[in-house]
């Protein structure tokens, strides 16, 4: 496994991040524990979760994924000590006021609940799952500063922020002499490249690490057409996957053909492309089984030359930074 620093921090993390959103709805607890053990065996030390993960389609069982992880930590053997643990706050955990979003009270209640479920005394990276347009940054940063001072969290990250949200957050943190954000999670893959317009330039400017989620677009970049022919396709978790496939079938076929030319698995090619992109610290992979994890780690060893990168840009055109992308 290769390692790098998370953004501008001195924190060392693996180039792949283990995503746990499948734990609960698609992966039973015993299998989830095996996946996490396998991640450590591969040298993956960076795990990502969220307080709302684990819920069923009816909204029940929120927090179940954190509980799975907490019981895995409780087994000992250095599991917690060897893990850089990231979780998230924002999603509503109940129907009562202040059980979601980013008021100081909501943040305090959410972190205490996550710590209990995770059976740990601190969270390494505490991420805002979404921007809260109603909570002022002065309130959010004051709440985060208290948690850092108490030793309950070490770093703060964001998820699904626009470029201007990142700028506002960082300038507010700067005025308080606070470190502010150190990372951002965004939807980013060969099919979804909109963050190249403004988010990635903002991340580079402020020194934030990028953790792309859905790096294979719910399996659409993982050899889906071949799997269709073989009858082995598994329905992904992302909504509207079938509609997106219908819209981009020709491009995806060209992509799978190109992967065959290179002699690599399409999933590995998609992850390797992300690992070559500016600001990317670690794509978030979401294996359902230890075997899926074993297959994903091969991407770290793939180096793409300029000709290969240019061909991928031809198949899936990207963006230049704004405003050059749409203006002179």
Image (cartoon, rainbow, N blue to C red):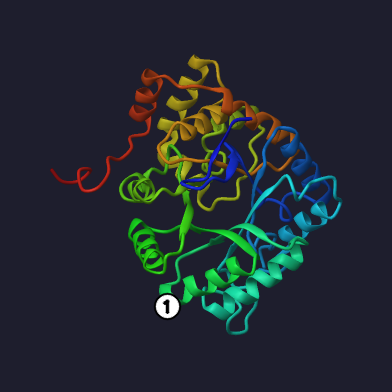
Whether residue 205 sits left or right of residue 4 in the image: it is left
Q: Position of residue 282 (x, y in %)?
A: 54, 40
Whether residue 185 sits left or right of residue 54 in the image: it is left
* Corner quadrant of residue 268: top right
Most extreme residue toward the bottom is 97
Quickly name the residue at label 1.
Answer: 134
Considering depth in this image, is 150 or 6 the residue closer to the camera?
A: 150
Q: Position of residue 21 (x, y in %)?
A: 65, 53
Residue at figure coordinates x 44%, y 34% from the top left: 249
**Quadrant location, the N terminus:** top right
96 vs 91: above or below: below
Q: Position of residue 41 (x, y in %)?
A: 75, 34
224 vs 24: above or below: above
Considering depth in this image, is 289 or 140 the residue closer to the camera?
A: 140
152 vs 96: above or below: above
Q: Position of residue 2 (x, y in %)?
A: 59, 30
Mark 1, other Cα within 10 Å: few <14 / some 14–19 / many ≥20: few
* Corner quadrant of residue 321: top left
Can you see residue 139? yes
For the image, the number of numbered tags is 1
Residue at figure coordinates x 62%, y 84% from the top left: 96
**Quadrant location, the C terminus:** top left
The local secondary structure at tag 1 comes to loop
Most extreme residue toward the left is 328
Can you see residue 93? no
Residue at figure coordinates x 75%, y 65% from the top left: 117
């Amino acid at each position: 496994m290769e390692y790098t620093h998370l953004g501008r921090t001195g924190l060392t993390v693996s180039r792949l991040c283990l995503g746990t959103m499948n734990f609960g709805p698609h992966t039973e607890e015993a299998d989830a524990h095996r996946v996490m053990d396998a991640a450590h065996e591969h040298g993956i030390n960076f795990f990502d979760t969220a307080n709302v993960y684990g819920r069923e389609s009816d909204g029940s069982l929120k927090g179940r994924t954190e509980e799975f992880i907490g019981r895995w930590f409780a087994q000992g053997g250095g599991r917690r000590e060897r893990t850089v643990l990231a979780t998230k706050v924002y999603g509503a955990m109940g129907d009562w006021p202040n059980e979601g979003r980013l008021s100081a009270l909501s943040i305090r209640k959410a972190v205490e609940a996550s710590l209990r479920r995770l059976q740990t005394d601190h969270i390494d990276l505490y991420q805002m799952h979404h921007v809260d347009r109603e909570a002022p940054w002065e309130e959010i940063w004051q709440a985060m500063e208290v948690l850092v001072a108490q030793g309950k969290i070490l770093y703060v990250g964001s998820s699904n922020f626009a470029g201007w949200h990142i700028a506002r957050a960082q300038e507010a943190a700067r005025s308080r002499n606070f470190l502010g954000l150190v990372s951002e999670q965004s939807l980013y893959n060969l099919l979804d490249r909109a963050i190249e317009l403004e988010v990635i330039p903002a991340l580079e400017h402020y020194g934030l690490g990028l953790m792309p989620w859905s790096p294979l677009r719910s399996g659409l970049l993982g050899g889906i057409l071949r799997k269709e022919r073989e009858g082995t396709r598994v329905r992904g978790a992302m909504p509207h996957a079938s509609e997106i496939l219908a819209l981009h079938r020709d491009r995806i076929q060209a992509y799978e053909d190109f992967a065959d030319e290179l002699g690599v698995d399409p999933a590995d090619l998609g992850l390797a492309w992300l690992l070559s992109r500016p600001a990317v610290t670690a794509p978030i992979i979401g294996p359902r089984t230890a075997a899926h994890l074993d297959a994903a780690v091969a991407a770290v060893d793939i180096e793409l030359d300029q000709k290969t990168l240019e061909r991928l840009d031809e198949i899936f055109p990207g963006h230049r930074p704004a405003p050059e992308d749409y203006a002179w």
